[in-house]
Each structure stands twice: as structure tokens, then as C-alpha cells.
Image (tube, helix red, strand yellow):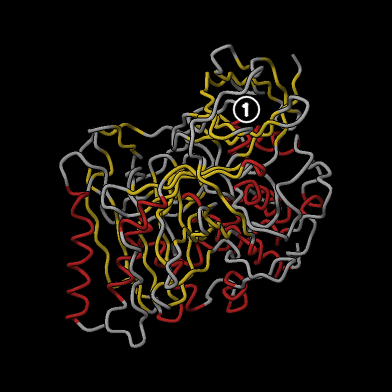
Amino acid sequence: MRDLDLLMLERRVEALLAPFGAAGSPGCSIGLVREGTLVLHRSAGLASIEQGVAIGPATTFRIASVTKQFVCAAALLLAEDGALSPDDDIAALIPELPDLGARITLDHVMRNSSGIRDMLELMRLGGLDLGAACTAGDLLAALCRQRSLNFAPGSRFLYSNSGFFLLGLAVERAAGMPLAAFLEKRIFAPLGMTRTRLTPTTSEVVPGLATGYLPRESRFIRAAHGFALGGEGGIVSCVEDLALWARNYETGRVGGPAMVQALQHRQTFTNGALNLYARGLEAGEHRGVPTMGHGGLWPGFRTAFLRAPGEGLTIIVITNHGGAEPGAIATEVLDAALAGTPGLAPVPALPARPVLEAMCGLWVQPEDGASFDLFLDGDGRPVARSHGVPAALVPLPDGALTARRGSFCFTLRSAGDALELESDAGQRGLYRRATAEAPMPEGLPGRYACAELGTEWSIDADHRVTARGPHAVGGPWRLEPVAPGLLRLHIPGALFDTWADIRLLPGGALEANAARARRLVFDRIA
């Protein structure tokens, strides 16, 4: 890289970091790796607001779901050892799991195509939010209560922390040692990642670990979380160590070229469509340049690990600012790093503002128990909010809008007075605008029970829901009618204020559909 190019990149990175340099702000650390070498590393902001400690090279962060690629790598290393196979039935390694009516392989969970409901959603619907104490045993028990799936394994994509939690358990059992010890022995130590570790609990003292913060109006509060963390998101790391991991994609020092290729290999669904999710990595593109990467999101921490393999580039962005958007920052850094690359596609323009404004509103599909909001943010950019969680929409060359964020993997196109939503595996559905205020259904107050959650919901005369689950009492939560036969159940949370779409079933039962846990039936019991 020429000195002039690097200087321009440094200026762009410093501009992106400028907001984090405000007095009393949590911070951000950005790294650029080219051909395996960390050529740029800058940080701004505070690792601890209380102590006034600035983020520095030794600062570590919770990288959340960026953990997933490491646990996939661990499973692939064990496959090389002959201790397991990606085609193994996960129930053979974790016999506590119930019969879910289909064979689920380790490869299904690595590709987020298992159909297993997300355990964080299950706990939330049972009244337990991320700020409360929750052990690995509690999470496994929640999965053992399941009797059905979101969909048939291998047929669709839906992001599920459950699969990677179970993958971590499978690695432990096949390796005969804790997941943290295996990762240290086989990946972190060989690569010299000395400040990286798996930390399953919040009670463990981690040198240099930043404090996570959440924005609240004009101030920050300390982020709280009490859930045990494993293969789905338990790693603590830093930019310099993740740069060593990025180099491994170039060198194959750990696992060899075969493992590196296996992590990035994409598989088709049963209908022949290609899954965007490889093994712990999401495939994408920027201006025609193929990318591979993953984001991480946990209360007070956000991470982006974005690679452009064909260009030898990796962008690493880690922050302890719960309101930051590291994915957008990483994309801007990548765009700057690609400047001057021949054949770059132009950035598609957003549709005109009147066109976008005409698309704004509440959109529903009552027959499937689904809804989302579309609105413009303060800068006039379109945002879709599904189950309470916002996802920025970006334009495609044909004028469609698309989102690529975790459980959000969809494209929107105008279809007359409807919006066509194309999701994973090429699934398409028409959403209609909710044009009138829907009435609250009569006769809702009562008691409802869901065996798969071990939870009872009580709806009072004011249509407030109290959840009594195996570990907590949650609520009261507000019910909001959005269309005939369809309601939203609003659930405040430490990370997001979410909602579950609630569909009224014949006979008085309710069907709850959360972002990553579908078709949970609550039978009326009183």
C-alpha cells in the first residue's frame, strides 16, 4: 500500500472515530489488515467512563457472535482429528436433546439452517431478559423442552444462537475438555492471540476488558447481562489478536487451507437456492467485491469482522458503545480501502424521497402472523423494524431495498399496493399496508400456557400480559392490535425493546412468532 493511500485511509478512519472522542463517551477501535499484516490501527473514546481510562492497544472487548467462526473452526479441527464429522447427528453428541422430528447435523447448526429456535427468544418469551442471571444449564433445559422446529433442517436460513451453543457443547464432549481450553490450545495459542479467551460468565476477571455502555437519552448507562456465554458468543478479544486470526485466512497456519476453505464454503438449501451463510461467516458483496464476515452484538458491545478475500483485506471494528454501528463503519473503511480498484461497481442510489415516503408505514401478513414497520431515519435513509429490531435498508441496482443483518436477510420490492418480501431460500410473500386502526379482539383476557416454553401467560382486562416462566416473571407487557387476527406483544429488553407477533388461532389459542422463534402455541387454559 502506498504511503499516500495509507495517509488517506488514516484520515478517513480518524473521521469515523471522531464522534467517539467526545467527552465521556465509550469508544471504538478500528483495524485494517492487508495481506495478513495490520497496517492501520486507531482507537478513540473510553474503555471505562467511570475511571476515565482510554481505549488502547491492550483493551479487550466482548466480540459476541464473531465467536461463531472460531467454534466452527474448532469443530472442523476435530473433524480432521477424526473425533467428529460435520454430518454427525447433533443428538448423538448431546443425547439430552429431545426428538424434534428430524435429523439435525452439526453442519446444519454451523450454517444456521437447523431450524432450532433461538434460546434467547425462548427465554425472553418466558419472562427472562438478558440482564438476568441464566446458566448454561438453564439454556440447555429450554432447548430440551422443544418439540418442534422453525422449519425442516436444511430447508431455510434463520439465525439461531441455540445451534452454536449446542455446537460448543458438542466440541467439548468430542474433545474431552472445556471449550475455552480447546480454543486456547488449538487456535489462540498457536496464533499468538494472547489477549483472547472464552469467558463463559460475567464473574470472571478479564484483564483490560472494556466496560459496555448503552445510550439513554443524553447519557450512558452500564450495560448489564447475566446469561452464560459459550459457542454462540463468549469470546473476549482485541483488534490486534483478531488481525492474527485474519492472517490465518491467508496462511492457514491453524487448520491449513482445507479448514480455511471449509469455513467459507456455502451450501444450497433443499430447494437448490444458495445459503448466504457459510460456517460462522456471512457472504456478501460491496460494489461487486465479494465479502465474508460476521457481526457481533451483546449489551454494550458491538463488533464487525469484514473480509474482502479477493482483495486481501480485513476490516475489524469493535466498540463498547451500544448505540454504534460497527458494520456501517467497517463498510466505509472497506470502501475507502478499495478506492482506485479497477471495475468497482457504482454505489446504487436510493429511490427518490417521495418513493421512499410512499413505502413507509406498517405492513402486515396476518395469515403468517408477521408484521414490520418501514420508516425513514433522521438522514432520510430507509429502515425496516421487524420484531422491534431496526435494520438499515440499502438499495440494489434494480431499485429494490435489501437488509443483511443477522436474522434479517430480505429484499423488498414494490408490488402495486403491496410490498413483496423475498427472504432466505428464495421465499416470497406479499405484505399489505395496515390502513386503519385495528380493534382489540374480544374475549382475550385469560390464561394461556405453552408447553415448549414451560410458561404461562396471563392477559388482564387492560390487555397487559404477565409471563410466568421457569426462571422469572416478566411483564406486564402491552398488547397492540395491528390487523384483524394479528397483535404485537411489546417486550422491553436490555438490548432492544422487541415485539412478538401474536396470531389468533381457531379455538382461542395464541401463536407467538418472534424474530428467531416461530409458531409457539399458547393454549387457553382459563
Q: Quadrant of the C terminus?
A: top right
Is residue 318 visible in the rendered image? The answer is no
Seen in the picture, residue 57 relative to 505 is either above or below; the reply is below
345 with respect to 51 (left or right): right
Seen in the picture, residue 276 relative to 229 is either above or below; the reply is below
Name the quadrant containing residue 22: top left
Is residue 298 visible in the rendered image? The answer is yes
Residue 212 screen position, x and y as percent: 36, 40
Name the quadrant containing residue 424: bottom right
Residue 415 screen position, x and y as percent: 52, 59
Between 84 and 474, the residue placed more toward the observer is 474
Residue most extreme to the top: 461
Residue most extreme to the bottom: 342
Q: Quadrant of the N terminus?
A: bottom left
Residue depicted at 70% across the width and 47% down the height: 150
Name the quadrant containing residue 119: top right
Name the residue carrying label 1. 126
Seen in the picture, residue 464 relative to 50 is either above or below; the reply is above
Residue 59 screen position, x and y as percent: 32, 50
324 with respect to 446 (left or right): left
* Secondary structure state at the residue bearing disc 1: loop
Residue depicted at 35% across the width and 82% down the height: 344
